[in-house]
Amino acid sequence: MDTLDTIIEVVSTSAPVIRGGLAGRRRKADEENPSGETQMAADVWADEYLEAELTAIDGVGEFASEEREGVIDCGDGLSVAIDPLDGSSNIKSNNSMGTIIGVYDAPLPASGRNLVMAAYVLFGPITTMMVAREGTVTEYVIEDGDRRPVKEDLTLPAEPVVYGFGGRVPDWFDEFADYAREIENELKLRYGGSMIGDMNQVMTYGGVFAYPGLQSRPEGKLRLQFEGNPIGYIVESAGGRSSDGEQSLLDIEPDELHQRVPVHLGNEELIDRLESTL
Ligand code: P6P
């Protein structure tokens, strides 16, 4: 089995284990992550579990996580960057969350153009996994440790339906909301506080998700290596667009491992409209 197949198999079989450990880990941990965010016990649990599983794979040469400083050198091979539990603040309100993984064929931090695969596991009512590899996107259901494809060569629907923006109602929100109400196929507001939960709405129905730069925080909130690049790779593999307001997220040359980036993701025409209001 090649390294990418093994990584997907490990992420898939890890999903029910991580999901099963969430209920008892809803408390805050005593630590902060490198972005200065208080960690949940579940963040630490998922991070430690996936580090052990992924660094043991022959062909994985580097490992980095949103939840820790630095890059672990594990020999020659591909570089794996994970957000072990994206949306973990949703654990308190029992809403969606999950794991994001980007696999780069370059040392970290790396440009998104070095991605060779990206995936996310979504802990919703059911557990699903979205995998982008070699230009196509496949959605799987994970049940009883088995992974079965339910959508192959997935592309964003041409008629978008949803929009959702993070950042405590950006100052341009009203203008976009007016547009969303006035267009022929009125858009519906969907924002759940977990990037992959919100992005799964966009992947399923078509639309736009953004965590934009703000006056108070021009760089936005989301991390390029662990969130922007992998999800941008998945959306672009599905025929959509990623942007930081100027360029594809995948074209950003990173300065440091945990750098943040404004994130606009989804159907091209909605990103154009969003960026015309910024
Ligand atoms: P806010 C989760 O903490 C996360 O990193 C993303 O999954 C999500 O899109 C964003 O932050 C939510 O941020 O400011 O709405 O809580």
Image (spheres, grey):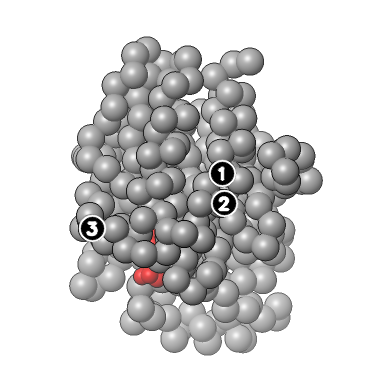
CB of mark 2 within 8 Å of CB of mark 1?
A: yes
Q: Is residue 93 above or below residue 40?
A: below
- Asked whether residue 61 appears in the rendered view, the answer is yes
Asked which quadrant contains residue 113, the reply is top left
Quarter of the image where the N terminus is located: top right
Residue shown at 61%/38% (left/top)? 12
Q: How many marks?
A: 3
Q: Nearer the viewer, residue 251 or 163?
A: 163
The residue lying at 40 percent from left, 33 percent from top is 51
Q: Position of residue 159 (x, y in %)?
A: 71, 65
At a point 41% along the width and 25% down the height, the residue shown is: 55
Secondary structure beneath label 3: strand
**Residue type, mark 1 in image:** Val
The tag on residue 17 is 1
Residue receiving disc 2: 20
Q: CA distance from mark 3 to mark 1?
A: 23 Å
Mark 2 and mark 3 lie on one chain; the one further toward the N terminus is 2
Q: Could you tell me which secondary element the residue under label 1 belongs to?
A: helix
The kind of secondary structure element at disc 2 is helix
Is disc 3 surrounded by few (<14), some (14 to 19) or many (20+) residues within 10 Å?
few
Q: Residue at x 32, y 63 (%)?
A: 28
> What amino acid is labelled 2 in the image?
Gly
18 left or right, relative to 216: right
Residue 35 numbered tag: none
Q: Position of residue 160 (x, y in %)?
A: 66, 67
Q: Earlier in the sequence, mark 3 or mark 1?
A: 1
Say the numbered circle drawn on residue 30.
3
Q: Is residue 93 above or below residue 130?
A: below
